[in-house]
């Protein structure tokens, strides 16, 4: 019996030691990455800001010392905060060493609210009389919406362009529900709760239309 106790104790010790070593390893990497990070250097003269959306754009940047390492479980996923992205565009606007922006809009996997914030920042950047040039091997609808701020838009000869305007429509189902004898019973909480209007009306209400026009 004592033999099995010793074996179990040895295995337990190896597992605990491995777990401690694992966390110490990543802790040391984090410390090294923190101290080895270079300070921000001023842009050299006649620079061009390279702007791409090939990142996971989140609301606010977070420090991730593992993003440059090839680690499993998504620990090395590269991301940038919308706040930092807009701040860099604003800084480039006032930096005399930066002459323009090169926009690589191949990917734009973000929501329209984020996309509009970036586009507004680019439009504001152009007030500095600096140029914006866009290039892509294929423009999606969102990517072309962003690239439309550029002075010149380039597309690969064999590339693709999703040339559609932005719009939305709502299907109203009240008449269809009436034909089936279905009567919607709605309980509202709040003034501008319009999510149920497609089931209770045949057209957009005045208050909902006014609110949508303000967006």
Image (spheres, rainbow, N blue to C red):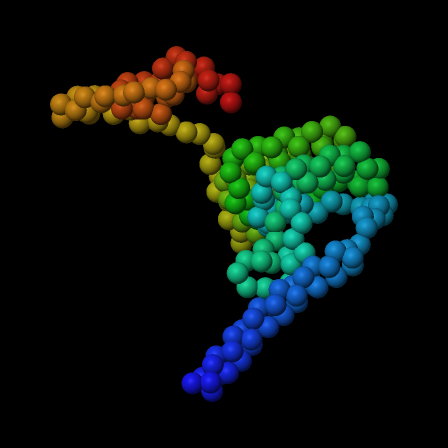
Count numbered badges in the picture.
0
x then y, percent, for residue 55: 60, 49
- In terms of depth relative to the viewer, which is nearer, 155 or 130? 130
* Residue 184: quadrant of the picture: top left
- In terms of depth relative to the viewer, which is nearer, 131 or 123? 123
x then y, percent, for residue 113: 54, 33
On screen, residue 42 versus residue 192, left or right, reads right
Measured along the vertical axis of the image, is residue 191 above or below residue 113?
above
Measured along the vertical axis of the image, is residue 193 above or below residue 113?
above
Residue in view at x 33 percent, y 19 percent: 188
- In terms of depth relative to the viewer, which is nearer, 34 or 41? 34
x then y, percent, for residue 101: 72, 42
Measured along the vertical axis of the image, is residue 159 above or below residue 211?
below
Residue in view at x 72 percent, y 40 percent: 88
x then y, percent, for residue 33: 73, 59
Extreme right residue here? 45
Q: Quadrant of the N terminus?
A: bottom left
Extreme top residue here? 206
- In terms of depth relative to the viewer, which is nearer, 51 or 7? 7
Extreme front residue here? 2
On screen, residue 16 versus residue 83, left or right, reads left
Measured along the vertical axis of the image, is residue 105 above or below residue 22?
above
Can residue 122 be seen here? yes
On screen, residue 22 versus residue 73, left or right, reads right
Can residue 155 be seen here? no
Residue in view at x 80 percent, y 33 percent: 94
* Residue 183: quadrant of the picture: top left
Residue in view at x 53 percent, y 80 percent: 10
């Amino acid at each position: 019996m004592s033999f099995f106790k010793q074996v179990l104790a040895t295995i337990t010790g190896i597992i605990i030691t491995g777990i401690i070593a694992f966390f110490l390893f990543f802790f040391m990497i984090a410390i090294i990455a923190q101290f080895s990070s270079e300070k921000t250097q001023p842009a050299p003269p006649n620079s061009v800001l390279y702007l791409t959306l090939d990142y996971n754009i989140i609301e606010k940047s977070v420090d991730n010392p593992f993003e440059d390492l090839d680690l499993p479980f998504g620990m090395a996923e590269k991301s940038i905060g919308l706040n930092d992205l807009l701040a860099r565009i604003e800084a480039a606007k006032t930096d005399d060493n930066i002459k323009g922006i090169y926009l690589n809009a191949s990917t734009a996997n973000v929501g329209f609210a984020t996309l509009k914030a970036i586009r507004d920042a680019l439009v504001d950047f152009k007030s500095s009389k600096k140029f914006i040039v866009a290039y892509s091997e294929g423009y999606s609808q969102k990517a072309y919406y962003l690239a439309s701020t550029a002075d010149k838009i380039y597309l690969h000869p064999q590339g693709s362009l999703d040339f559609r305007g932005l719009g939305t429509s709502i299907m109203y189902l009240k008449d269809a529900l009436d034909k089936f004898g279905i009567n919607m019973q709605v309980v509202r909480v709040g003034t501008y709760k319009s999510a149920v209007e497609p089931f209770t009306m045949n057209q957009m209400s005045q208050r909902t239309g006014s609110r949508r026009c303000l967006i």
